[in-house]
Image (cartoon, rainbow, N blue to C red):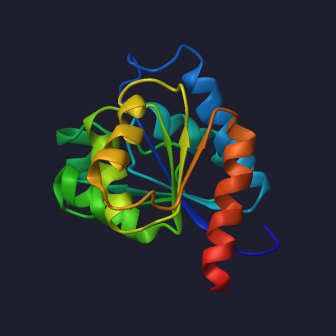
Amino acid sequence: MDRLPQLKIVISGAAVTTPCREDMHEIAYEIGKELAKRNVLLLTGATTGVPLWAAKGAYENGGIVIGISPARSYLEHVKVYKLPIDFHHTILYSGEGYSGRNLLLIKMGDGALFLCGRIGTLNEFTNAFEEDKPMGVLLNSGGTEPYFQDIVRDAHRGSGKIVWEENYQNLIDQLIALINKEMEE
């Protein structure tokens, strides 16, 4: 690798992908691959499902992937939480459980991508919205994703810095442009 990544993007999505659209693993892999091509550092919750497939896409295509675990140690990560270590360059052990890890993960990223989800993704979405982070949501990806627009509307806190897009390549383009614009201000 010639240069270190400048942008850090969090991948947030369902660890169990049964509520997701059928091709979610392939899409997550392609998103990871695309972020690697753009020299973006990928941050994940060091978990299974959507984040793992995105990590695999980035890792296998020359990207850097860092996981933030809810566990206190490697042993707790694999034995208690039963989480993988594959496709990450390093995993940091937060010791904060899932909800604490989610907040740390969101705070560490320059922006976040949301693809399909369950309760943890919903938690990360509301954390990112509260933290005023640039966010990208892959529309029609399944799980809790359809609720995100309702949450933003019903929160009466403005529209946030959110890109809503059905095409993952356009989503990545627009999110990176939003992050870069924010970094220039």
Tell which of 1 and 50 is nearer to you: 50
Residue positioned 70% across, 34% down in the render: 167
**Which residue sits furthest right?**
2
Tell which of 125 and 32 is nearer to you: 125
The image quadrant where one finds the N terminus is bottom right
The image quadrant where one finds the C terminus is bottom right
Residue 2 vertical position relative to residue 141 in the rendered view, above or below: below
Please indicate, yes or no, whether residue 60 appears anywhere in the rendered image: no
Residue 36 vertical position relative to residue 118 in the rendered view, above or below: below
* Residue 23 x %, y %: 60, 18
Residue positioned 35% across, 42% down in the render: 121
Tell which of 157 and 106 is nearer to you: 157
Residue 106 vertical position relative to residue 37 in the rendered view, above or below: below
Residue positioned 56% across, 44% down in the render: 55
Residue 29 in the figure: left or right of residue 70: right
* Residue 98 x %, y %: 22, 50
Please indicate, yes or no, whether residue 122 appears anywhere in the rendered image: yes
Q: How many callouts does the rendering have?
A: 0
Q: Quadrant of residue 165?
A: top right
Residue 48 in the figure: left or right of residue 95: right
Q: Quadrant of residue 7?
A: bottom right
* Residue 62 x %, y %: 74, 53
* Residue 56 x %, y %: 60, 40
